[in-house]
Amino acid sequence: MQTAPILVTAFYKFVPLPDFTALKEPFLEQARKHELRGSILLAEEGINATISGEPEPLLAFLGWLKQDARFADLTWKQSYHHAKPFNRMKVRLKKEIVGMRVDGINARDNRGTYCDATTWDALLNDPETLVIDTRNDYEVRLGTFKGAVNPVIQNFREFPAWLDKNVDAAKHKKIAMFCTGGIRCEKSTAYAKEQGFSEVYHLEGGILQYLEDTGNTARLWEGNCFVFDDRVAVDDMLQPVAAIHCTVCGTELTTDDHKTNRENQFVCQACRG
């Protein structure tokens, strides 16, 4: 069993990558060379990744990546785990690094105003601000910010239609959005601005950065944060939470159990039939 600490890093960047298809094999070769596991998505609009490995090799890989001028200013969120939370290493070519399926969204230049943890706490306590959780419902079930609106969506592609139907630019003068690591809000806030919302805020770095910066000292985050790997969720200190079990058979729930759950909160796929 792996006992040495495993570093888990998550990062993204919207940057033009016209040669993204040619990057797949070098990325995969370097990741395997450093015995990393996880997922890297590449598209013409940029990169989105969560990868894990022993600290020194993983940081060496990131150093190699930053040699490309397009990634020179890349930053990442990190946490530690007792074992690699992914089974293998994947590098995938995609149309989008986060799927919204709305043509023409300029996430690089037209996103909402970034705010840090202190500003975010002020927005949460401002009754004139509509705070929106842009994540999927199965993620929100495990935890969210106090007072945040849950759109109850099963996929990020549903978010634009929900916003169009439920949020009025004439009525909601100030809106603030958040997600796990920040990437979905790059697009959701850009979309909102293009729909006429003028005062749009974005929690920079998402929930993970907020918890890393604050440890949730203001107690405005409630519950745990869902993550897309074998850890399932992390707590205020970004440590894996105790296993979540099926309320029917008692088996430990996996990320896939949560992602495919449409009706029952904590029931495994086998018991759902």
Image: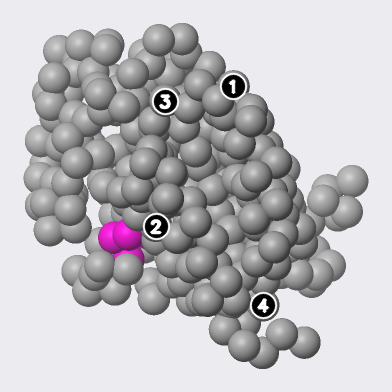
Q: Residues within 10 Å of mark 2 (few under 14, many from 20)?
A: some
Q: Nearer the viewer, residue 26 or 268?
A: 26
Which residue is disc 2 drawn over?
76
What residue span does the magenta drawing correspond to? 207-211
> Can see residue 35?
yes
From the image, tell me which residue sits under label 4.
83
Q: Position of residue 20 (x, y in %)?
A: 57, 29
Quarter of the figure with the N terminus:
bottom right
Which residue position is annotated with label 3?
16
- Queried whether the magenta region covers residue 210, the answer comes back as yes
Q: Nearer the viewer, mark 2 or mark 3?
A: 3
In primary-sequence order, the first of circles 2 and 4 is: 2
Name the residue type under label 1.
Lys
Q: Is residue 163 left or right of residue 248?
A: left
| Residue 95: assigned label | 1
Give residue 63's quadrant in the image. Answer: bottom left
Q: Amino acid at mark 3?
A: Pro
Q: Residue at x 39, y 33 (%)?
A: 14
Q: In x, y percent, where is residue 48?
A: 51, 42
